[in-house]
Amino acid sequence: MLIIPAIDIKEGKVVRLFKGQFDKVTEYGSDPLETAMYWQALGAPYLHVVDLDGAKTGERANRDVIKRMAKELEIPLETGGGIRSLEAVRELLDAGIDRVILGTRAVEDKKFLSKALETWGSSIAVSLDCSNGFVAQRGWVETSQVKGKDFAQELARMGLKYIIYTDIARDGTLSGVNMQGLKEMLDIPDVNIIASGGVKNLDDIKALLALKNECLLGVITGKAIYEGTLNLEEALKLSC
């Protein structure tokens, strides 16, 4: 199971939101590339990078710094936030991004997602951000009428291989992973799940490892490693 540091970018700075709320922001750095280099130096095998401005507005204001990260880092990264066209997907993959994460557009337009999967296959992931069991979209500021598990099953039938599952109510709260919701996702065959939201400490990492589920590809951690409640190097040793 991969331990994946998160780098959320808002107005060019590294931040974390509380439960996805854009008015509850904590800043942790002024240089996303510097932060990425730091996590790489500690042994991170992969990075999860989100353009929060893009997620909210659809305007990918931080794409240049993300492309620079892909160029200068030695480890791969996945990125999402405001990616709502095939041209945007192609641009990022051509820039060296390992995996592009689709969100709002994938929920609203299955033809778009189908074309992306047909063209790029396993280089595409979908961010399944849920609030009370329903899929959220547009930077988590709107909740759809689509149930998370139903949507995940539909994605699997379309051939998607990577889902990033986030419980918004736990994201940035250090309250632990929604294990029940995660287990529901892990019941869906032929899809790799990356868990996100609520990770606090090594106990959470141990609980995820104890599932011994091959479909659990990794876990994203953000606030815990920035606040120091989770030591990244210890977590990486545990996951080896």
Image: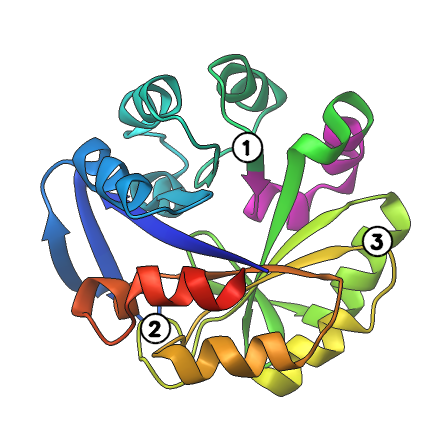
Q: Residue at x 22, y 32 (%)?
A: 33
- 127 vs 21, nearest the viewer: 127
- Write down the region rendered in magenta: 101-117
- 1 vs 125, nearest the viewer: 1
Ranked by sequence position, the earlier of labels 1 and 2 is 2
Read off the residue under disc 2.
19
Q: Is residue 196 visible?
A: no
Tell me whether the residue at label 1 lies in contact with that at label 2, contact meaning CB atoms closer than 8 angstroms.
no
Q: Residue at x 46, y 43 (%)?
A: 46
Residue 184 lies, in percent from the top left, at 74, 78
- 134 vs 122, nearest the viewer: 122
Read off the residue under disc 1.
84
Q: In this picture, is 147 found above or below 153?
A: below
Which amino acid type is marked by label 3?
Answer: Ala
Q: Residue at x 55, y 83 (%)?
A: 207
Identify the image quadrant of residue 98.
top right
Residue 233 lies, in percent from the top left, at 32, 60
Which amino acid type is marked by label 1?
Answer: Arg
Ranked by sequence position, the earlier of labels 1 and 3 is 1
Q: Residue at x 34, y 28 (%)?
A: 66
Residue 91 lies, in percent from the top left, at 51, 15
Which secondary structure type mostly characterizes the magenta part of the structure? helix
Read off the residue under disc 3.
156
Query: Could you tell me which quadrant the C terminus lies in?
Result: bottom right
